[in-house]
């Protein structure tokens, strides 16, 4: 580098007329192998809190939007995720690598995580309710 580079104080443009800035060559984008290896694990059901007795229930995905009843207190309610009546505590999904059932908090849905059994890279994906 020359000893006396003179630049504009506001825009940082090179003011030495005899000097020409070199073009910067950006390297090509290479995706990381770790990011490409993530496999989707679809949610198979929900862990919810019974609106009546507040006990935890494990309910399959096929019952979303339908009327269900608590096995502890027999309270009947409609399973609509996201309504004030139903509090979802978590979800469960099988690991696509080792087939073990995983329980995950709702905050891990759509995040890249690893299986606690086999350390396989997965993304827990919540399926939209079927109409």
Image (tube, rainbow, N blue to C red):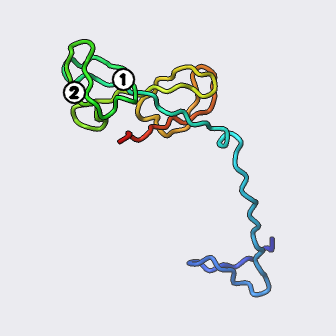
User: 101 or 3: nearer the eye?
Assistant: 101
**Measuring 77% from the left and 67% from the top, which residue is drawn there?**
25
Task: Determine crowd level at label 2: few under 14, some 14-19, many 20+ residues with C-alpha closer than 10 A.
Answer: some
Indicate the quadrant where residue 56 lies.
Answer: top left
- The residue lying at 59 percent from left, 22 percent from top is 99
Identify the image quadrant of the C terminus: top left
Q: Is residue 31 above or below residue 47?
A: below
Q: Quadrant of residue 128?
A: top left
Residue drawn at x 57%, y 22% as measured from the top left: 116
Element under label 1? strand
Q: Which residue is mark 1?
A: 59
Residue farthest along the top direction in this orientation: 72
Where residue 123 appears, x then y in whole percent? 55, 36
Horizontal side of residue 42 vs 37, given as left or right? left
Q: Residues within 10 Å of mark 1 (few under 14, many from 20)?
A: some
Q: Residue furthest front?
A: 131
Residue 7 percent location from the top left of the image: 66, 78
Side of 39 relative to 47 (left or right)? right
The answer to whether 67 is drawn above or below residue 83 in the figure is above
The numbered mark at residue 77 is 2
Q: Quick one: 72 or 14, which is closer to the camera?
A: 72
């Amino acid at each position: 580098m020359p000893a006396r580079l003179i630049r504009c104080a506001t825009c940082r443009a090179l003011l030495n007329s005899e000097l020409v800035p070199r073009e910067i060559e950006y390297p090509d984008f290479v995706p990381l192998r770790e990011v490409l290896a993530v496999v989707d694990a679809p949610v198979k059901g929900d862990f919810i809190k019974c609106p009546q007795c507040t006990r935890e229930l494990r309910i399959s995905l096929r019952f979303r939007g339908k009327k269900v009843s608590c096995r502890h207190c027999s309270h009947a309610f409609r399973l609509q995720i996201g309504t004030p009546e139903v509090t979802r505590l978590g979800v469960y999904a099988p690991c696509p690598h080792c087939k073990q059932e995983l329980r995950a908090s709702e905050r891990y849905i759509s995040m890249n995580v690893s299986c606690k059994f086999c350390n396989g890279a997965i993304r827990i994906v919540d399926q939209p309710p079927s109409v």
